[in-house]
Image (cartoon, rainbow, N blue to C red):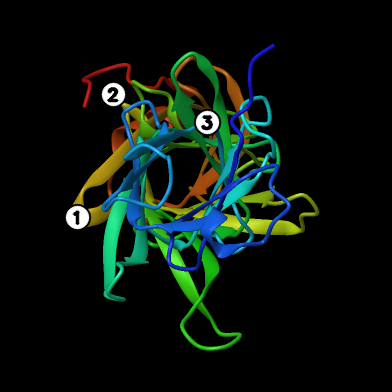
């Protein structure tokens, strides 16, 4: 049977590791050490504590801690010690802020104090990939070499801004008694709205990092697409709007253009079954690029089209056309 380490650990309010030898009944302060040092992570997301000065302890200068990652109620980072390796499955709470969310990494800022009482900030990061859980919450899967991924679930709210970025919001303790401040994280990716009852936000296609949400059928708007989704364990119906404009092109199909940051544009092509109404509005039953029905109908007026697709409208009027095929002509 594997021998368990006979030392218990905790973290003080300044993110310093506290070590206490287990099995001792005495409360003499000498057996409880506040270790001056910093937490670090490596490329495998293992957690280390590097001691900066010799401690009155038999501990080595660098400790490798075994356990799993999660997120606390106040969005502090939690490392739960492995119960098979330690006498207690203690939770180490690293108090700090999430300062950035990237496609394959989360970066945290921690504050500590040295033996002279001087405060200092430093960063640690975790690598992995993002996904949406079954409740449409944002989560980060921390990669672990030879071990299952650890899931960090973000239980706050998220929404979409006018640049079609996901903005995640949460509250975090601030300096001062019983005070909290609002914090946000911005995710920079692009949307795929080409599947029925699914809405995907892609951060990194190669690593499958991104969010795939379960949603209602999309409802076209004059300037976008609107969905409803339940977010959280006991969800209400949240409205999610993807902002953009509709165009048609006889060679390309139906085009939905979505603005992104820095003036960039993302385009999705659809096919459509088409009907020209007596009032010269164009009714389109959208299909994916593979020809699958999406259950979404779009109505475009000639004024909205602003002259685009006139040749196709005339062909419909003459009974020579009934459908648009996505990407049938030139590719973008």
Expressed as whole percent of the image width and height from the top left, the position of residue 201 reads 45, 39
For disc 2, the marked residue is: 251
* Picture residue at 48% right of the left edge, 14% below the top: 290
Question: Residue 120 occupies which quadrant of the picture?
Answer: bottom left
Expressed as whole percent of the image width and height from the top left, the position of residue 207 reads 37, 23
| Quarter the C terminus occupies | top left
Expressed as whole percent of the image width and height from the top left, the position of residue 22 reads 65, 43
**Between marks 2 and 1, how big is the CA–CA gap?**
25 Å
* Picture residue at 57% right of the left edge, 88% below the top: 177
Q: Viewer-proximal residue, 233 or 172?
A: 172
Note whether residue 241 is visible.
Answer: yes
Q: Which mark, by number, is residue 66?
A: 3
Number of numbered tags placed on the structure image: 3
Depicted 154 relative to depicted 194: above or below: below
Q: Viewer-proximal residue, 295 or 168?
A: 168
The mark that comes first in sequence, 2 or 1, is 2
Disc 1 element: helix
The mark that comes first in sequence, 3 or 1, is 3
Q: Which mark, by number, is residue 263?
A: 1
**Between marks 3 and 1, how big is the CA–CA gap?**
45 Å
| Quarter the N terminus occupies | top right
Of the two numbered discs 2 and 1 in the rendering, the one whose residue sits closer to the viewer = 1
Q: Which mark, by number, is residue 300?
A: none
Q: Residues within 10 Å of mark 3 (few under 14, many from 20)?
A: some
Disc 2 element: loop
Q: Residues within 10 Å of mark 2 (few under 14, many from 20)?
A: some
Depicted 317 relative to depicted 303: above or below: above
Expressed as whole percent of the image width and height from the top left, the position of residue 210 reads 45, 35
* Picture residue at 73% right of the left edge, 56% below the top: 237
């Amino acid at each position: 049977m594997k021998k368990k380490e006979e030392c218990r650990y905790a973290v003080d309010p300044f993110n310093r590791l506290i070590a206490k030898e287990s099995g001792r009944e005495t409360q003499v302060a000498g057996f409880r050490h506040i270790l001056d040092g910093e937490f670090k992570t490596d490329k495998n997301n293992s957690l280390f504590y590097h001691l900066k000065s010799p401690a009155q302890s038999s501990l080595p200068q660098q400790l490798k801690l075994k356990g799993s990652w999660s997120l606390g109620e106040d969005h502090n980072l939690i490392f739960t010690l492995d119960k098979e390796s330690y006498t207690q499955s203690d939770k180490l709470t690293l108090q700090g802020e999430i300062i950035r969310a990237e496609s394959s990494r989360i970066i945290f800022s921690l504050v500590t104090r040295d033996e002279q009482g001087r405060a200092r900030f430093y960063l640690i990061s975790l690598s992995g990939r993002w996904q949406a859980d079954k409740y449409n919450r944002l989560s980060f899967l921390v990669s672990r070499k030879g071990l299952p991924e650890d899931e960090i679930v973000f239980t706050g709210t998220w929404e979409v801004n006018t640049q079609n970025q996901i903005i995640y919001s949460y509250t975090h303790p601030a300096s001062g008694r019983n005070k909290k401040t609002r914090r946000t994280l911005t995710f920079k990716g692009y949307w795929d709205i080409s599947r029925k009852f699914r809405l995907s936000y892609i951060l990194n296609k190669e690593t499958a990092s991104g969010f795939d949400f379960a949603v209602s059928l999309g409802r076209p708007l004059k300037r976008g697409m609107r969905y409803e989704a339940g977010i959280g364990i006991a969800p209400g119906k949240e409205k999610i709007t993807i902002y953009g404009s509709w165009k048609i092109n006889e060679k390309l199909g139906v085009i939905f253009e979505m603005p992104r940051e820095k003036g960039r544009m993302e385009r999705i092509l659809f096919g459509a079954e088409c009907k020209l109404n007596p009032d010269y509005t164009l009714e389109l039953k959208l299909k994916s690029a593979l020809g699958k029905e999406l259950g979404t109908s779009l109505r475009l007026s000639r004024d909205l089209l602003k002259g685009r697709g006139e040749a196709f409208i005339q062909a419909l009027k003459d009974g020579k056309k009934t459908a648009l095929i996505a990407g049938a002509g030139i590719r973008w």
